[in-house]
Amino acid sequence: MNAPAKLTPDDFATDQEVRWCPGCGDYAILKAVHKTLPELGATHENTVFVSGIGCAARFPYYINTYGFHTIHGRAAAIATGVKLANPELNVWVVGGDGDSLSIGGNHLFHLLRRNVDVQYLMFNNEIYGLTKGQFSPTSRVGTKSPSTPQGSVDRPANGLRFALGAGARFVGRAIDIQQANLGALLKRAHGHKGASFVEILQNCIVYNDDVFAHITDKKVAADAQILVEDGKPLLFGKDKSKGLRLNVKTLALEMVTLGEGGVGLDDILVHDEKNRVLGGLLADLEAPFPVALGVIYCDPAESYEAAVWGQMAQAKAKNPKPDINKLLRAGNVWTVE
Amino acid sequence: MVGSVAGTAAQRGRKKVESVVVRFAGDSGDGMQITGSQFSSSTALHGNDLATFPDFPAEIRAPIGTTFGVSAFQINFGSRAIKTSGDKSDVLVAMNAAALKVSLSNLREGGLVILDTGSFNERNFVKAGYKVDPRTDGSLAHYQVMEIDISKMTLDVAKPLGLSQKEALRCKNMWTLGLVYWMYDRDLQPTIDWLQGKFGAKAPEVAAANIAALKAGHAFGETVEISGDYAGYSIGRASIEKGLYRLVQGSEALAWGLLAGSQLAGLEMLLASYPITPSSPVLHSLSDLKAFGVLTFQAEDEIAAACAAIGASYAGRLGVTASSGPGIALKTEAIGLAIGTELPLVVVNTQRAGPSTGLPTKTEQSDLYLSVYGRNADAPMPVLSVRSPGDAFETAIEAVRIATKYMTPVMLLSDGYIANAAEPWLVPDIADYKPFPVKFRTDPEGFHPFLRDPKTLARAWAVPGTPGLAHRIGGIERDYNSGNISYEPENHQRMTDTRANKILGIANDIPEQQVEIGAPGGKMVVVGWGSTYGPINRAVSNMREAGYDVSHIHLRYIWPLPRNLGDLLRSYDQVLIAEMNTGQLRTLLRAEYLVPADGLNKVSGQPMMISEVEDAIRSRLATAKAAE
């Protein structure tokens, strides 16, 4: 076989007209995925995108690979079947916050705990878009929507905390419009063997515009975000003058400024991707703390489909020429003359 | 209908009978199911034909001595063809008062009751709801009663072998089995071998005690203690087709049929399932067949099970999901996705009594509507039904054939009775089956995912990993000519019609409906489907012998219906549809053929009886005659 020609982002676009609202954050995510796939060496034939229902779930129609747009909440279960059937496939799952954490919360939980080797991209816009603007499981308390005219009263779910609680071995977060960081995170997620959970903060321009402005707005971004890197101190702020320190008495993170009150670089926590406790603390951060971005937690373990196929290989080694006629004749049989 | 057990004359030597129904009944923890299945194996090896009916509660270990904790196993065996587990029993083995209370009404008048007096005491009477000792109030006057202190006799042999009182008492089912083996002249050895295999290595004292109890029960029968009044019986070999036989349970045969089907299709299988009674044995059977390339996935719920199976089919394996009514209800949206995206899928529904949780361990045939109609929108799919444990193998193969050839989910209906029942099975040879290999699409030339075979209307199956065929499919309506999303009104009409016609066209690819007994045309036909096969068949055959003009038709194909069925039904004066629901097949056949079908319907959680079908035939034909 000839060496395949190097694929470009355009090669991963389809001929289908993209049907998201103009200005939707999904366009930025699509662009990042189109750009990242060739960098990963992905092929059209060995890549599969599976999605549930919602705006985000239209994603597979716009990627020139195999794609399966399924039913609400069940993409994780269908992707599990795809990966089990053929572990060679590079499987991505795309869902919104409602698809993933509400109707599909159960399946996402089990996909993560089993550690099926797929990349799960949760586009979080804190709203139901396709059904016209109802509050979602990630909407903040007080969200006014057609179904909550006085403001929502239920407390929001934290996707990263949910994933960690489910036993996910890879948890990360990015922002739709930060192309470089998003691309880098997608690459890490792809490289991780096992379930990778990636939350992408995504702006819904029609029903929840600027819901993340307090994090993404250029004026506040430096203080409102912290991009974590393994082995590096947890610094943020315009000139990286601020940092996160562990208060050992409260077992909580606190914000400190280098050089103030005798705080030095040694006082700042160093990010350790394999530290699940730290991952939990970072997942919880919200204003006035900076929101954590990047690879929050990554500690690989054997993936589910590998273990299942391992058992099958053992069974086949024990019985290399299985014969159904023999199976039917095992145990007590007798002949009628 | 069966040989009498009433052996009043003191006689040595065995009395010949044609067939017998024995019912073992005891507490859930008394081991009645093991007793029954061991008796079945020995009986099959003895050369009798047989049919079994395990009848147990949903509770795993209900409080001891209660009526709701009674677990029973009924077996009908004989030297003639056996078609049902028997209407009434000839012998009832009651291990406690509750078992007697629950099962006595099932014993024919004059039948024999064997009682373990060791568990007949005041406390047990109260628990069973008896006000006085049933042995003294005349309620057993119409039966023969054999009172034996089985508990004590078991303790006498089992305890000295090093077992505790409690452990030793658990051997009393083997003592009882030994006695019944003596009564019917069965060989002990297969059960001894089984006990050795099960306990020999890890608990040799348990194996020894059980074997001792088995032998003691047998010896008890053989010695003077009872043989004076109750001579043993002898039942000749049944004249059945020559060949190699084994006992097979419905769920086991169904699982093997799925494996055989996948091999004939040239595919490996993924069964995704969620535990549910009475479907779980299908999952258990297939979980042990990994060497055959069978993958099993115990999903987090019924929906995930259906979805994972669909994902597997999408990726090129044979996706199968198995459940029972409540679980199938949960899968319906996913089945709709498989219908819309036209992916093969086998959905096994081992029906149980409902609605809701209903009677989880009891049988019913009430998911026909659910199977044929039970989805949102116009969502047709083939529905097949299994008539007996052995038939589950054949019908499962057919389900795989249709699913893969027509790119469609197929509903495969079994029921709780078939799943648990066992019968002797002429073991098939896989070489006798014609393969139906699946051809995945690999040619990119002119490809789109909804390109159809002009004859079957099945779409191309192109699996991920195939170069040049990357494509997107989904639940949104697909364009007939490209497979892309389409909201065009004419296209939706065309796709809906095509999906319906594809399924209807299967009628040309299945056999014409045959008449089981009788002939086309005549005064009456009894139509059935599923596990009512045995009682209908025997009843119709009995009634024909008695001079009635009645035939039997039994459907394997519920949807689409066989192409000649309408004409066939119209050739009879009366159509009687016997089913264990309130008239679901009747509604379907009336709607399809406008035939004035009548119904014999039963939903007691118990299998239909031969006598019930006979009575229904007799009364209708008598009425028709009177009206002439």
Image: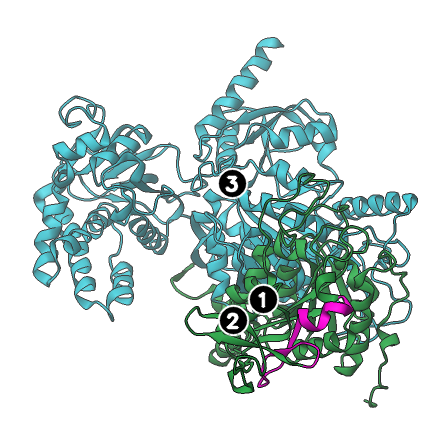
Residue B13 in the figure: left or right of residue A296 = left
Q: Nearer the viewer, residue B154 or B324?
A: B324
Image location (x, y in percent) of residue A261: 53, 79
Q: Amino acid at mark 1?
A: Leu
Magenta region includes residue A238: yes
Residues at marks 2 and 3 on the same chain: no
Looking at the rendered image, the disc whose residue lies closer to the viewer, 2 or 3, is 2
Question: Which quadrant of the view contains residue B189?
Answer: bottom left
Question: Which quadrant of the view contains residue B621?
Answer: top right
Q: Colour of chain A?
A: green
Q: Is there any visible trace of residue B472 in the rendered image?
A: no
Judging from the image, mark 3 belongs to the subunit labelled B
Q: How far is mark 3 from mark 1, CA to CA?
A: 61 Å
Discs 3, 1 touching: Cβ within 8 Å: no
Judging from the image, mark 1 belongs to the subunit labelled A
Residues at marks 2 and 1 on the same chain: yes
Q: Is there any visible trace of residue A300 in the rendered image?
A: yes
Judging from the image, mark 2 belongs to the subunit labelled A
* Residue at image mark 3: B531
Label drawn at residue A285: 1
Image location (x, y in percent) of residue A276: 50, 74
Discs 2, 3 touching: Cβ within 8 Å: no
Q: Nearer the viewer, residue A27 or A243?
A: A243
Q: Which callout, 2 or 1, points at the residue further toward the start of the chain?
A: 2
Find the magenta span and give its range: A217-239
Image location (x, y in percent) of residue B392: 54, 51
